[in-house]
Amino acid sequence: MSCAETTVPTAFNRLVIASFPIMSDEFDIFAHKQLSEAEAEVRLHEEGFNELPSMKARSVFTIIFEIVKEPMFLLLIAGGTLYLILGDPEEALMLLGFVFVIIVITFVQERRTERALDALRDLSSPRALVVRDSVPRRIPGREVVREDIVILSEGDRVPADGVVLSSLNLSVDESLLTGESVPVRKIAYDGKTEFGRPGGDDLPFVYSGSLIVQGKGYARVERTGTRTEMGKIGKSLASVETEETLLQREIRVFVRDFALVGLVLCTLVIILYGLSRADFLGGFLAGITLAMAILPEEFPVVLTIFLAMGAWRMSRHHVLTRRMPAIETLGSASILCVDKTGTLTMNRMKVTVLSTEGEDFEVNGTQGEGLPEQFHDVLEFGILASQTDPFDPMEKAIRNLGYKFLAQTEHLHETWTLLKEYPLKPDLLAMSRVWESYRDHNYVVAVKGSPEAILDLCHIDHHRRGELEVQVVNLAARGLRVLGVATATFGKGLMPPHQHEFDFVFVGFVGLQDPIREQVPAAIEECHRAGIKVAMITGDYPVTAIHIGKIIGLEYSDHAITGPELEKMNDEVLAEKSANTSIFARVVPEQKLRIVNAFKAQGEVVAMTGDGVNDAPALKSAHIGIAMGERGTDVARESASIVLLHDDFSSIVGAVRMGRRIYDNLRKAMAYIIAVHIPIAGLSLLPILFGWPLILFPIHVVFLELIIDPACSVVFEAEAGEPDIMTRPPRNLKERMFNARNLGISTVQGAAVFATIAIVYTSSYFSGRSEGEIRAMAYATLVVANLGLILTNRSWSNTIYQTLKLPNRALLWVITGIVLFLGAVLYIPELEKLFRFAPLGPVDILTCVVAGFLSITWFEAWKHFRRKRAARHAVLNS
């Protein structure tokens, strides 16, 4: 829609101006320079729309190409193509099917990450009411230009950064930009104050994306688009790159190295076999078999299965995973940066304490408990001093409590008529409302505001004032926002121009609080047990933040680093101070991002929770961004890796537990894959080195991987977490899955299995058995040993006997499948011929079973003695 299409009829123009009657005496909108439609069109053309520029959209083919050029995907495609050449379309279709699934999943995630700036642009472009050519016009926010005069009313989103020209009780919720849950007051521009950042009362500036919660005003636009405070956040969001996880890098390198080794060995086998036996066709088949045995196509498939299943399991606990690699990183989190407003707290003001005559009434929220009579007046006049249909969260809280406790009493006055309102002033932070009472012939005046202003209006003597100030200090120390309430009566007639001329009588104090979420203290305690430091980053005042930190049990909650203090620190000092600090108060968005990066620079794995626009850059920069789904903005959700659908803070702990479990099980699965590939590769190479009959052909390897390996991935993924999963410290970010210890254990496991099968193979060969019997004996032992590797790798601390007591329904299906598969290939004639086997007797089968399980006995013994040694150490240490 163009600006020219938004002209509003004259009757509406009069209606809009008439809606500001109180302001019309003090402010002449037509005395200020207004843009014409032509000027606005020119400025729109020169400076651009009032929105954040979209990132250049990547085409579908570009994204797919970026995905498939990774080595792991190339190997999968190459493996599928290889099987097609060999005439095994079933295996080829399976591998290429995995390629398709992975591409689709990754493509969807890539597209979602590009929506963050789109969501920010949508949020920053509300409808706007501007004055052009002396006519109010409702236009799209994206068409607002510099020097437009904007009319602001309760419930409006501010379309751009601007200077307030006139205001009447104007209060703005800037929590999306500052994290401060309490609305701030706005005053008219004095012509001197420099344009600054959002946050704080009595400033003459409004900011794009903030919400008008009370009053009315006019503002002149000074900044649009990327030049606004929200625009700066958008630009910093665009500049933050999402990092590849360590595990992704590890697997890519590991797969690449395996592929290179396989290619070299495959070439050598073809040459060696062809020259030694004068059979290059047989050499080609032997080389292909060895390459298939070494080709680690399971790694990327298993990683995808684990992360996809992990995302599904987390979704059942109301946790949405937007970027699956974050699941394994989550288990390594060592720092959890938490935004207070809406994350630790409800982002909803609540009256906590009523105070009068030196007595306090604690509001516990129960319906059954009544309100003592002496506190009725505090609520009655607090309601009368508020808007009839309030938008301000504090006024809503007072009104809701009044209608809860004072219903059906004479303290609510729905029929009274409002006569005059005295707005807040910078020099008197109190708002009075004059009502026509029907119980006598006087006017009733109700006032609420800062305690200092109320005490000043009541002209309280020095001694009494000191007592009341002590009450205020005590309430504020509890993290409460304190308002004073007073009342006066006034005979009918001409009302005074100033509030000071009323004879006010002090009534009491109202203490309000943004309540803490019920589950937060227990969740933070569990984080501490898991070795995770929780840091609260908020735009609120230090006293309030420290008080909340003590309630929820934060470490180092006796002090805080404030935004101004942080501004003066360099990165080194910030790193030193933050090591013993858990509370960061009065922080602006750019500083949140800096705090996260400072923790990252120390080698910490940082998880960041948040729900506002101001959290988006930090959410994206953190290793794991966790957004609150119900109250969170689209920007926060699109920038985060994980979204809590029910805003339940305790879900974060469950997600960490799930992340640790997934990584543990993934390590077990990877160890198994490495171990099982060693005997398969060894059996492919051994006959070639000694000139013996080949044991394995491509079909043997295909069926092993087709039936056993994917099934084993399901088994390990379904394993329950180890008992100590949430009592041990987080995994070091530099710790590799394929480290020397893990690779060593896997290699020894695989070597022991290979040695056992080699003994069975050579003894069968030298005992004069047929080639079919030799092959069947070796293959059956390999299949049984494969099952043994699955059972022993279910846990690296518990023995097979102990783990069999743990439920795992997938394991039963795998064992059943292995037994049926082995019986089918050994005793169904068609399959027996296809696999080039000869029938085996009962003794032969028993020999294969015993040999297969003996191959992993050493690892079971190692686990047993390791547990006994750990138990002895525990007794000695206790």
Image (cartoon, rainbow, N blue to C red):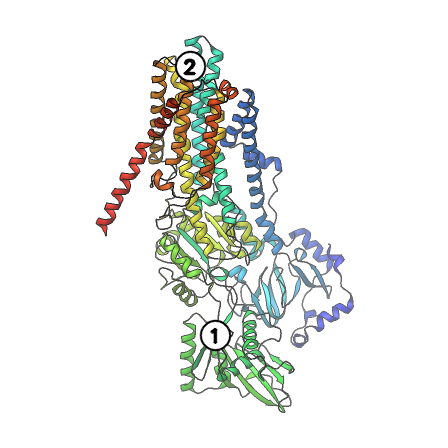
Q: Kindly identify which residue carries mark 1.
A: 363
Task: Write the residue at 36% across / 24% down.
Answer: 847
The secondary element bearing badge 2 is classed as helix
Foreground of the two, 643 or 568: 643
Identify which residue, 345 or 573, lies in the foreground: 345
Q: As drawn, which residue projects farthest toward the front?
A: 842
Residue lying at 47% horizontally and 45% vertically, measured from the top left:
326
Task: State which mark lies toward you, 2 or 1.
Answer: 2
Label 1 near label 2: C-beta < 8 Å?
no
Q: Note whether 876 is above or below 287 in the view shown.
A: below
| Drawn side of residue 130 relative to residue 550, left or right | right
- Find the residue positioned furthest to the top: 278
Which percent across, then down, holds residue 829? 51, 20
Disc 2 target residue: 771
Q: Which mark is residue 647?
A: none
Does residue 521 appear in this view? yes
Front-most of 830 and 461?
A: 830
Residue 346 on image: x %, y %:
50, 63
Q: Earlier in the sequence, mark 2 or mark 1?
A: 1
Residue 486 vs 862, above or below: the answer is below
Q: Position of residue 734 (x, y in %)?
A: 37, 41
377 up-or-down from 262: above or below: below
Q: Amino acid at mark 1?
A: Val
Q: CA distance from mark 2 to mark 1?
A: 87 Å
Residue 112, how many percent across, how many down?
Answer: 57, 45
